[in-house]
Amino acid sequence: MAAIEYNHDHVIVNPRKALTVTETGRCPVVHFDHNSDEHSADPAGSYRALREQTPVAWSEAHGGYWVLSDYRAVFEAARNDQTFSSERTEYGGDGLAVVIPKTPVAFHIPIEVDPPEFRKWRKIINPITAPAAVARMEGLVRHYVTWFIDEIIEAGQCDMADVIGVPSIVTVDWLGLNVDDWKRYAFAHHAALAAVPGSDIWKHAMEVDFPYLDGVTREVIAARRADPQDDVISYLVKAEVDDRVVTDDEVYAMVDLLLAGGVGTTASLVSNTVVWLYQHQDVRAELAGDLSLLDKAIEEFLRFFSPTQALARTVMEDTDMLGCPMQKGDRALLSWASANRDPSQFENPDEIDIHRWPNRHTAFGLGVHRCAGSNLGRFMAKELLGQILTRMGDYVVDVDALEAYPHQGTNTGWQHIPATFTPGERLLPPGATAPASC
């Protein structure tokens, strides 16, 4: 993205894409669209150009929205839910409130609920995503990581993006949904955020896969209410809020959010990381030689790659953000990815330092809406990277055949990572598919 230039009247003078300040007195209007091919070609560079020139700016794409790109602006907005709301409103059209443009998917709890109502829903979610709960899932995660690698280890070649299907199948199994449908859940939720809006893949997800999955998910919710099992959906159907049992629609709103988060973010993080480690053999060797370094390294990979690049808010009252007048009904994009590259917060932000500490990144968001699944995401990433480094440690990526997500406005990553490696041995018994007893 070209640098943004201004004259003394604060009018953009980039001759190729000239825009002016609007008559309503907004801050500079910029040529920016996080959904564009231009942005997807270099998300970090696109945000850098904004951050360095005007960290709070107005884009006229998608009906108009603010872009907050430095750490201070993102931090302030994310912690002010009264002004910067996550709830569905009439502003910005219909659909998921935390993306721009809004995506036509189901209402999500609690990400689309603001305080004080938010807290009672998060109280339901916290026990199943807390460190103690994740610790009880370690056997499930390890089994699936081992199984996925077993499926390709003897061949000595694979698409590593297939191996990174682990977060999807773990999430589906953990929730209590039919594991046979994991690929369809993965495809639909991935397409909703990583396919180009309006493309054939995106339309198929919206018009075919989501309606099908909506039906089968609701069938499971009804079945668990009648006959509870040892799974998350069974826990959710028994939960209470405001001295009443939650409804099936409310359970669905929580389950669909857990699916969306489980399918996308960890796969994005690991896909970016395995490619980067191939390109930086010294760091790969260091991690392979001492897996205890993975904990800090994963925090740095989270900062650098920011699997969820940005989320949206709706301005609910006239306000001022770093000198820019915002009006009620405006939409705003809070870029976690850009905040994570702000040199005022991070030394050498465009470089990965696996020993960086402390690391106060925003990859899981900020404020009350900070990602509830962060503990599970970290553990899945650690187990995946650990087994890849030990069982496929000499993997070679065919860089020329890499295929990035076509749309990187919300999640970045690689959808095809062709690789070769020294063949190894399977670890699970022949024919093993179901999770081990744990």
Image (spheres, grey):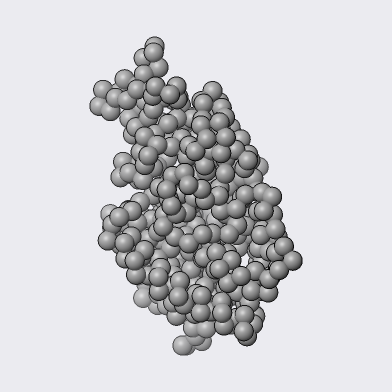
Q: Is residue 303 left or right of residue 19?
A: right
* Front position in the image: 389 or 58: 58
* Horizontal and vertical percent position of residue 169: 49, 72
Instruction: Between residue 282 and residue 404, name the one nearer to us.
Output: 404
Residue 253 shows up from this direction: yes
Hey, which quadrant is residue 295 in on the image?
bottom right
Q: Position of residue 372 (x, y in %)?
A: 62, 57
Q: Is residue 129 above or below residue 170?
A: above
Could you tell me how many numbered marks the image carries? 0
Question: x, y percentage for residue 137?
Answer: 63, 72
Q: Is residue 81 above or below residue 347?
A: below
In the picture, residue 236 is in which quadrant? bottom right
Instruction: Work out which residue is located at the far left of the displayed protein and give it.
Output: 16
Question: Which residue does the image show at 33% across and 60% down from the upper left?
Answer: 202
**Along the viewing direction, whichever of 390 and 77 lies nearer the viewer:** 77
* Residue 153 visible, this orientation: no
Measured from the top left, where is residue 210 in percent x and y?
41, 68
Point 65% across, 42% down: residue:
358
Horizontally, is 75 left or right of 421 in the view? Answer: right
Extreme front residue here? 90
The quarter in which the N terminus is drawn is: top left
| Residue drawn at the location 52% of the way across and 43% of the way down | 313
Quick one: which residue is furthest to the right in this view?
243
Quadrant (top left, top right, bottom left, bottom right) of the C terminus: bottom right
The residue nearer to you, when weighing 346 against 127, is 127
* Residue at 43%, 52% in the rendered image: 94
